[in-house]
Image (tube, helix red, strand yellow):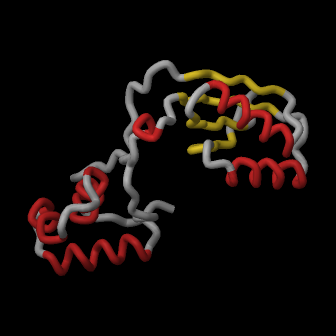
Amino acid sequence: MAAQLDELDRKILSAMQEDATRPLDELAQLVGSSRTPVWNRIKRLKANGVIKRQIAVVDPEALGLDACFFVFIRTSEHDAGWLQRFLEAVQSSPAVIEAHRLAGEVDYILKVRVPNPRAYDEFYRELIRHVKIFSVTSTLSMEEIKSDHGLPIAVE
């Protein structure tokens, strides 16, 4: 169920998605309010789970993670034991930065960041040590055209 957000909530969220490190006074001025109401709204948004966490967005290439692979996985096994092993393997791997269960012919898609193709191969070998996979298709991203962690928030 979607949270009930008013215009001020949406302005706060939009501004925080751009830069969550802004001082509270600057944020309040930007959204057209004062410090205390903005602080109370942020606390409520956190308590209600609208703001899940505040993080720093790091440039992967600055860390030497130059290769981004999208991994399409099909499995012929759909039992609880396989799923548990798969989830553990995916969640414990620092190379997996996104994982989604899909509808359609492909069961899962992973976004994997590694230094190079050899490191991807090591990731792949580790994954198949944990679970049997029917089919894997890996695609190397040649260029990241857009990467935005902010969600589209309509400000009325």
Q: Nearer the viewer, residue 113 or 8?
A: 113
Q: How many marks?
A: 0
On the picture, is 19 further left or further right than 58? left
Where is residue 44? Give x, y as percent. Answer: 36, 76
Residue 136 image position (x, y, % from top left) = 77, 27
Q: Residue furthest top?
A: 142
User: Residue 138 sits in which quadrant?
Assistant: top right
Taking the image as shown, residue 41 lies to the left or right of residue 126, namely left
Q: Is residue 38 left or right of residue 95?
A: left
- Residue at image coords 12%, 65%: 26
140 vs 107, nearest the viewer:
140
Pick the residue in front: 78 or 124: 124
Residue 1 appears at what percent x and percent y? 51, 62
153 with respect to 55 (left or right): left
Where in the figure is residue 22, as x and y percent of width and height?
Answer: 20, 62
- Residue occupying image coordinates x 21% and y 64%: 8
* Vertical arrangement, residue 38 with respect to residue 6, above or below: below
Q: Residue at x 38, y 30 (%)?
A: 146
Residue ID at (84%, 35%)? 75
Q: Is residue 11 above or below residue 62?
A: below
